[in-house]
């Protein structure tokens, strides 16, 4: 696991919504993050934040979003999008007796890291709007640690097609 250069606690807001589907009754989706939320175990009991016709939102716990010096390019890409996103990963619980079927597992500002979780296919990964205070935190981190890497075009080696070894047989094999 990578070492964090900076960490920011984020409260994860998760929504349970009824769906019209013959195989499932409801779907889970992260819908927001709360910057500076008090510590709450994501695997513990959730606090209901609101409900309506067919949906309920919960403060599902606190995760620490880590920022890393080597990933500032990914953060710049994220901030260039409108709106910037915080990516939340929900993981399914293995114990069916727990109160909720999923729990917040990971949070990141890197779209590349979120894509890695999507590629695995086992988790629910959603981007939620990044709060202004988190945008400021990420911008400050980028301005402090980003190092522009110069692009070096790779030069192609020249090959002589008549040279031995380039699809040609040597003199010892010619009859």
Image: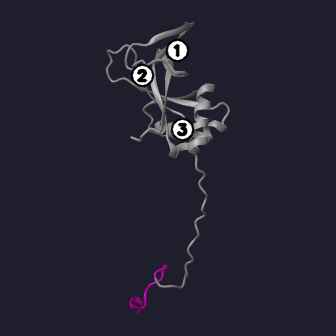
Drawn side of residue 80 relative to residue 55, left or right:
right
The alpha-carbon separation of the residues under discs 1 and 2 comes to 15 Å
Name the mark nearer the viewer: 3 or 2. 3
Q: Residue at x 54, y 7 (%)?
A: 51
Read off the residue under disc 2. 103
Drawn side of residue 106 relative to residue 51, left or right:
left
Read off the residue under disc 1. 17
Read off the residue under disc 3. 110
Q: Residue at x 37, y 13 (%)?
A: 99
Mark 1 and mark 2 lie on one chain; the one further toward the N terminus is: 1
Q: Is residue 173 magenta?
A: yes
The alpha-carbon separation of the residues under discs 3 and 2 comes to 20 Å
Q: Is residue 89 magenta?
A: no
Q: Specify the quadrant that holds the C terminus.
A: bottom left
Name the mark nearer the viewer: 1 or 3. 3
Boundaries of the magenta span: 165-175
Query: Depth check: 35 or 61 in front?
Result: 35
């Amino acid at each position: 696991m990578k070492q964090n250069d900076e960490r920011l606690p984020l409260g994860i807001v998760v929504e349970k919504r009824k769906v019209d589907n013959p195989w499932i009754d409801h779907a889970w989706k992260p819908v927001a993050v709360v910057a500076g939320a008090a510590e709450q175990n994501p695997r513990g009991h959730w606090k209901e934040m609101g409900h309506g016709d067919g949906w309920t939102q919960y403060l599902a716990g606190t995760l620490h979003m880590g920022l890393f010096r080597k990933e500032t390019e990914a953060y710049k890409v994220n901030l260039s999008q409108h709106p910037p996103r915080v990516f939340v990963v929900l993981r399914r619980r293995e114990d069916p007796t727990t109160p909720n079927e999923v729990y917040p597992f990971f949070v990141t500002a890197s779209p590349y890291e979120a894509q890695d979780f999507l590629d695995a296919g086992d988790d629910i990964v959603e981007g939620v709007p990044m709060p202004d205070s988190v945008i400021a935190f990420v911008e400050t981190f980028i301005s402090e640690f980003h190092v522009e890497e110069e692009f070096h075009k790779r030069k192609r080696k020249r090959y002589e097609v008549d040279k031995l070894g380039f699809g040609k047989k040597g003199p010892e094999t010619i009859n």
